[in-house]
Amino acid sequence: MKLTRRQVLTAATAMALLPASVRAALPRLEAREAVQQIAPDGYDPTRIWCYDGSAPGPGIRVPQGGRVQRRLVNSLSQPTSVHWHGIRIDNAMDGVPGLTQDAVQPGDGFDYDFSVPDAGTYWYHSHNRSMEQVARGLYGPLIVDEAAPPDVDRDLVLMLDDWRLDPDTVQVTGDFDNGHDLSHAGRLGNVLTVNGRFDPSYEVARHDRLRLRLVNAANARIFDLGLDGVDGWIVALDGMPLPEPMPVAGTFPIAPAQRADLIVDVTAAAGQTASLVSVERDGGYGLVRFEVSGESAGGRRDAAPTPLPPNPVPEIGNLADAPLHRMVLQGGAMRWLESARIGDTELSGRELAELGRFWALNGYAERPEDPFLDARRGSLHRIAFVNETAFPHAMHLHGHHFRLIGADGGLGPWRDTVLVERGETREIALAADNPGDWLLHCHMLGHAASGMMSWFRVT
Ligand code: C2O
Ligand code: CU
């Protein structure tokens, strides 16, 4: 029997009148401590903070257009919150203490309940004292499935992270307020993990076609990735499908918080090891091993994958009419701030450093009172990120995806986080269509905590 519209309305009203504790509880997502083998085998396990007992936390997977419903339960000793990174979400569910909700105190909970408009690879992570909480393991994957997923033998989420462990105790070091890290590249780790394990391996067959969903959950590390023994295409960036799959040639960067979806074919022979490689100045090392055995049950594919179906993102209209807003990235080692503002107060670089502030956005070393951009719902904007610092930054907008604007003025891929190299200016096109107050910050989490934090409003 179907409920009538009247019955549904009555039920909804009754629900609203009940105190939250009496309503049917949502599935829990518990932020808590745990121990996990982060260092290579043979070392002690590491005490971590995580969701539901492991880092990454549980894979949350919903169909496109479906709902995510979780009650965050805070069993940590610090307040916390969850941000659903890259989701074009209802503002009240965005998880930003001081802007969209109060931080959830130890012992308390918060109900997150929202629908997801776009298919793709997303993630969730703490947004309170995130430079510490994410570094300790408070993150997990959020996968939104296309109605018709692509033809692959295996769909693998690979969350990359680097942990800074004390070499003697293999525990997470507590030096989150270290001024040297904050004013330089950020907190870089000494143990690299994928899905919370050092040097993991997966079994694959020759000619298997794999979908690899790469997520960079590290505080500050930019990975330059390459493939060995597998060959393929990038099919989506930051969750959003590319109009044409892009063949992987050489290496490609993935900055903190960015994602890349790859579709790859295993070309290595049975008995060999293929790998996802991280390339650094002093050479490369494998992040993930694929042990190849047998022949693919799916058979060898000769054709390139077809593009993933596009998501229902807004149209980017005529850019010529869109106002241009400059956001200047300032400060850091070698380009030290002479002065910047916190609220109405202008402070000297020395005073700011004493407060642990080393960076500024348009002259503010803390999220300002007024928004950087006050946009009418449905309006189109250009934002130029002007990087005057000596370091790269990964600039992230909440609640929206935007399109990169190429040097030739043409529109590039949709993203939610853009890597702006030192000395570079990157322009983006933003269709401000999601009402609310939204953060805009560097996703190198130490930079965000020491000055690179702003916001915009859509009404
Ligand atoms: Cu993934 Cu404001 O962050
Ligand atoms: Cu930065």
Image (tube, rainbow, N blue to C red):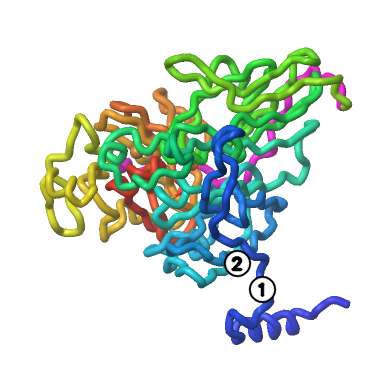
Circle 2 — which element? strand
Kindly identify which residue carries mark 2.
71
Q: Which range is magenta?
A: 298-325
Q: Is residue 47 left or right of residue 337?
A: right
Q: Secondary structure of the magenta portion, mostly?
A: loop
Label 1 with label 2: CB-CB less than 8 Å = yes
192 lies above or below 349:
above
Could you give the CA–CA distance between mark 1 and mark 2, rounded to whole angstroms?
A: 7 Å
Q: Residue at x 66, y 80 (%)?
A: 12
Circle 1 — which element? loop
Q: Residue at x 65, y 21 (%)?
A: 275
284 lies above or below 352:
above
Q: How many marks?
A: 2
Q: Nearer the viewer, residue 312 or 265?
A: 265
Q: Hey, what amino acid is under mark 2?
A: Arg
Q: Is residue 429 left or right of residue 13?
A: left
Magenta stretch holds residue 303: yes
Q: Hey, what amino acid is under mark 1?
A: Ala
Q: Nearer the viewer, residue 141 or 412?
A: 141
Mark linked to residue 25: 1
